[in-house]
Structure formats: C-alpha cells, structure tokens
Image: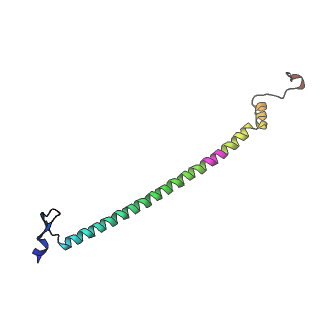
Amino acid sequence: MDDVFTRGYIHTDILGEQIVRERVAPWKQDVKNYLLIVATLVFFTLLFVWSRLEVLQTGYALSQANQVYENLVKESQCLRVEVASLKSPSRIEKLAKEKFGLINPTQGKIILIP
C-alpha cells in the first residue's frame, strides 16, 4: 500500500515527451497546506500587532508634543505679561527716579525746538 503512494507516475507534456514525477504522499501535502495556513496567520497577526504598536507609539508622541506645546504657550503668555510690565511708563519713571536719581524737568529747563 505504501508503494502506491510513493511510486512515480508518468505524464506527457505538450510535445508528447514523457515526464516521470514522484507522487507526494497525501499526508505530506496536507502538512504543507496546514503549515502554509499557519505561517500566513502568524504573518498577518504579527503585522496587525506591529501596526497597533505603531499607532500606540504615535499616540504617545502626539500626546507628548501637545504637552510641550501647552507648556510653550503658557511660557509665552508669562513672557508677554513680563514684557508689558517692564515696558510700563510708571515702572520706568520709578526706576529713573530711584536708581538713577533723575527728576522731572522744571518749566524753565524745557526747550522747544521748532
């Protein structure tokens, strides 16, 4: 019985030449098919897991970028407030009087240039 599955068979091609091919045992063909199916499933499973990991990592990177952006916006607002307070005329006048000893000019010291 084993001899039936392993014996070669004769086949003729288009030109009429005979080709001898070995028969593949049916269980070997089934094993090959199962291995092919399992390999395909493993490949697509790994592909799916990889894509989900990429989405997850991209989400983390986006979240981190958003956090950095929010921090920069807050810092920018604080710096704008600081610039406005440093440019205020009352602060500059106070600094000129206290630190540099400047005073407001009297009416006689003001010269108008036409």
Looking at the picture, tell me which residue is in the foreground, 30 or 20. 20
Q: Where is residue 77 in the image (x, y as percent from the top left)?
A: 67, 46
Residue appearing at x 88%, y 26% in the figure: 106
Residue appearing at x 73%, y 37% in the figure: 87
Looking at the picture, tell me which residue is in the foreground, 83 or 91. 83
Is 71 positioned to the left or the right of 98 in the image?
A: left
Looking at the picture, tell me which residue is in the foreground, 39 or 63. 39
Residue bounds of the magenta highlight: 72-77
Outermost residue, bottom direction?
1
Residue appearing at x 30%, y 68% in the figure: 37
Q: Position of residue 108 (x, y in %)?
A: 89, 23
Q: Is residue 16 above or below residue 61?
A: below
Q: In this view, does 60 lie above or below 45?
A: above
The quarter of the image holding the C terminus is: top right
Residue appearing at x 79%, y 33% in the figure: 93
Instruction: Say which quarter of the image contains residue 41.
Output: bottom left
The quarter of the image holding the N terminus is: bottom left
Outermost residue, right direction?
107
**Secondary structure character of the magenta stretch overall:** helix
Instruction: Say which quarter of the image contains residue 36.
Output: bottom left
Colouring: rainbow
Q: Is residue 114 above or below residue 60?
A: above
Is 50 positioned to the left or the right of 27 in the image?
A: right
Is 41 positioned to the left or the right of 111 in the image?
A: left
Instruction: Say which quarter of the image contains residue 110.
Output: top right
Q: Where is residue 109 in the image (x, y as percent from the top left)?
A: 87, 22
Looking at the picture, tell me which residue is in the foreground, 7 or 31. 7
Q: Does the magenta stretch include residue 31?
A: no
